[in-house]
Amino acid sequence: MIIHRLEPQGFCKGVIMAIDIAKKSVNDKNIKKPIYMLGALIHNEHIINELKDLGIIIIDDKNKTRLELLDLINDNCGTVIISAHGASDLVYKKIKEKGLDLIDATCPYVKLVHEKIAKKIKDGYDILYIGAKGHPECEGVITNSDKIHLITSSNIIDTYINNDKIYATNQTTLSIYEIDNIYNKIKELYPNTIIDNKICDATTKRQKAVYESPLVDLLIVVGDSRSSNTKKLNDVGIKKGLKTLLIEDVNQIIDYDFNNINSIAITSGASTPSYIVDEIIEYVKKVRP
Ligand code: SF4
């Protein structure tokens, strides 16, 4: 079996920072306990379980927004960690109103998007924000102002804005191979739009590595199925014409039939620990030396 371990692998800077902040908070005597994590700190079950073991309480429900999740925490009782995906201004306000302390583990790339949008709104712009409905990063942005209009790939034409000043930006983990199409459509409708593509470096490098990878029999994408950047790696593989397999860890390939597979490439989302990729490679080497 020929195995191509695509680089980069392991955590991106934003994820390293968020995990570090969360772990340090546990032993910091100055931080009010209990510590609650609002939604998953990052989209990876292995890391979430590690944090649970350290005593952090995870408040999560896929049917509830971050704002609604706060209702599940008693007032004046501990500290809330904001996840790497960031949160809306309303979430910060409600944490304060509830008398809770706050630890902010928002990725700096996401913060930058929030800051740019806030400045543009102040300067009189309407904002077109390209994102995935329901994803926490997107939710954290679009609920900040009615001047922010969510654009998914399908609803551009329906979006009408009566303002000459339009600024368009996006969620940090979208596909670098799809976003230009959306921006081109926006430009057709609103030629004066300022385009500010904010797909982050970690996402860009991983997608390029997949697109430029050798033509293999199977692309294995390792990561959590809720992780936007992981799902996009899978999409890029499909776009390249590869057969893909998205798995969270080695347990999910135990039954996979490798008989007709002679070469694989393996990539992983920015919140996937490297050791999980190593375990998968070891397993494949064992079943198909
Ligand atoms: S994938 Fe990008 S935006 Fe998301 S945490 Fe990592 S560096 Fe930040």
Image (cartoon, rainbow, N blue to C red):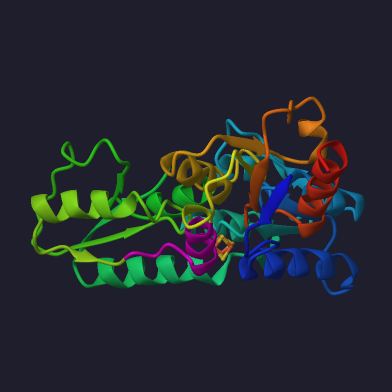
Residue 140, position in %: x, y?
48, 53
Residue 284, position in %: x, y?
80, 42
In the image: residue 263, left or right of residue 165: right
Q: Residue at x 83, y 45 (%)?
A: 285
In the image: residue 225, left or right of residue 284: left
Q: Where is 80 relative to 158, above or below?
A: below
Q: Note whether residue 265 is visible.
A: yes
Q: Where is 266 relative to 250, above or below?
A: below
In the image: residue 76, left or right of residue 218: right
Quarter-of-image position of residue 8: bottom right
Q: Nearer the viewer, residue 33 or 62?
A: 62
Assign the N terminus to one quadrant of the image.
Answer: top right
Residue 240, position in %: x, y?
44, 44
Residue 249, position in %: x, y?
77, 41
| Magenta region includes residue 208 | yes
Q: Residue at x 18, y 41 (%)?
A: 159
Assign the C terminus to one quadrant of the image.
Answer: top right
In the image: residue 57, left or right of residue 175: right
| Magenta region includes residue 148 | no
Query: Which secondary structure class fits the magenta region best?
Result: helix
What is the span of residues highlighted in magenta in the rendered image?
Answer: 197-209
Which image quadrant shows ligand 1? Answer: bottom right
Q: Note whether residue 75 is visible.
A: no
Q: Nearer the viewer, residue 199 or 281?
A: 281
Q: Nearer the viewer, residue 36 or 188?
A: 188
Q: Residue at x 71, y 53 (%)?
A: 272
